[in-house]
Image (tube, rainbow, N blue to C red):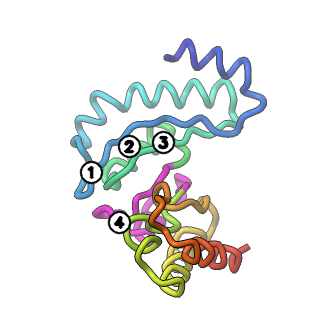
Amino acid sequence: HLANLAKYLEAVGDFIQVIIMVDDYGQQQGPQISTRMFRDYFKPGVARVCELVHERCPHVKVLLHSCGSIAPLIPEFIEAGIDALNPVQITAEKMDPAVLKREFGEHITFWGGGADTRQVLPRGTPAEVKDHVRRNIEAFAPGGGFVFATAHNMLPDVPPQNIEAMFEAIDEYR
């Protein structure tokens, strides 16, 4: 993997801004593995990928996709060299936007968590969606380190007026 990544970075490193690593370490109530298990078995490989990217292409950021409740692992991700997290599943346990920003916002970018795609977007009213999106932006955005994206993919059951309400709330912060 590292050899292929090195070739990839050599070929297109000047033209990209983000490398995405995909692993799902979380469940709804907490990580799938202990912090110790992550540290012992997974972190060394994650760190080698981050080191390679940052050495070869210092302008490229490493984004980790991991769903679920991963808050206990975030310090390990930061230490390994992860620059951003996605999707930031704010409905999972211990994934409160204000707490995440306060505890980790100086060290990692939150690329997601702007809107809940499980309950609020599909089932809320447009006013509830706007209020929800505003609160999440207010929690994540101060000082930078936030890229607005939903907490996961939007499914076909999201009413168009709720998508419109989400974008209206985003536009208030531009």
Residue 65 place in picture, x, y as percent = 46, 44
Q: Which residue is mark 4?
A: 91
Residue 63 place in picture, x, y as percent = 54, 42
Q: Earlier in the sequence, mark 4 or mark 2?
A: 2
Q: Are marks 4 and 2 in contact (CB under 8 Å)?
A: no
Alpha carbon of mark 4 to alpha carbon of mark 2: how far? Answer: 21 Å
Alpha carbon of mark 4 to alpha carbon of mark 1: how far? Answer: 11 Å
The numbered dot on residue 97 is none
Q: Which residue is mark 3?
A: 64
Label 2 Cα neighbours within 10 Å, binned few <14 / some 14-19 / many ≥20? some
27 above or below 128? above
SS class, disc 3: strand
Please tell me which residue lies in front, 103 or 120.
120
User: Magenta region: which residues?
Assistant: 85-111
Q: Earlier in the sequence, mark 4 or mark 1?
A: 1
Residue at the spot 40% in from the left edge and 59% down from the top edge: 89
Answer whether residue 105 is magenta in the image. Answer: yes
The type of residue carrying mark 3 is Leu
The numbered dot on residue 27 is 1
161 above or below 103? below
13 above or below 65? above
Q: Which residue is mark 2?
A: 76
Q: Earlier in the sequence, mark 1 or mark 2?
A: 1
Residue 102 place in picture, x, y as percent = 46, 68
The type of residue carrying mark 4 is Thr
